[in-house]
Image: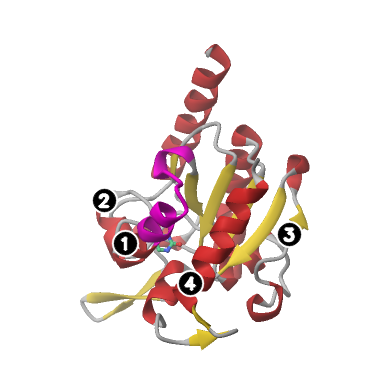
Amino acid sequence: MEAEASREGRLEIIATHVRRCLRCDLSDRRLHAVPGEGSATARLMMVGESPGASEDAVGRPFVGRSGGVLDRVLNLSSLRREDVFITSIVKCRSADRAGAKLRNRAPLKWEIGACRPYLTRQVEIIRPRIILCLGGSAARGVIDPGFRLTEQRGKFFPGPFSSELMATFHPAYAGRWKGSVAQGRNLEELLLQDIKMARDRLV
Ligand code: URA
């Protein structure tokens, strides 16, 4: 119990560092950094690309439209948000100014590099059994820079601390292309299939 409390404490210290982080320029565009949330002893860790506008507004991961898709597939997999740990490779919204607005873009290599120590520490503390990358950008940041989602999705690779790494579609992409069919199934069904596969590997 004490060990678990200290894991939570150590995660909270990381979160505090993330919220104050000035390692890259994304810090001057954020409203809130999004360190991640969930169980400090999660066996399944989910890693997205970077927070969007909705997440930036409240400082929590996957609360916008992509969060709706993620919640749906978690429910259908009988997984509870509080039992997994959800974060992203970059903890601040990656966006450029476009007039008075911000336009989302993929995080740059050096932004991912600047943010990497936070994810590394989170993995060291939580020691998840499976790290599931949500989308190609997360997979290239975590598994391999040459990762090809279409070919390597749903496969397991060796990860740190005896974990296994796997990648699937980003919920926002799966939601946007819900009607698109690959292997005879729509992308949300494939996302669900992959999450269930990761879940079944936990036992
Ligand atoms: N995409 C992410 O990677 N993280 C979020 O919190 C939302 C969308």
Gap between marks 2 and 3 measured at Cα? 33 Å
Gap between marks 3 and 1 measured at Cα? 26 Å
Could you tell me which quadrant the C terminus lies in? top right
Q: Amino acid at mark 4?
A: Glu
Q: Is residue 158 left or right of residue 153?
A: right
Q: Is residue 148 left or right of residue 196?
A: right
Gap between marks 1 and 2 measured at Cα? 15 Å
For the residue carrying disc 3, how many other residues have a C-alpha within 10 Å: few (<14), some (14-19), or many (20+)?
some
Q: Amino acid at mark 3?
A: Phe
Q: Which badge, 2 or 3, comes first in the chain's sequence?
A: 2
Q: Is residue 175 visible?
A: yes
Ligand 1 lies under 8 Å from the Cβ of mark 3: no
Residue that numbered label 1 is attached to: 68
Residue that numbered label 2 is attached to: 58
Q: Which residues are magenta?
A: 70-83
Q: Closer to the camera, 77 or 70? A: 77
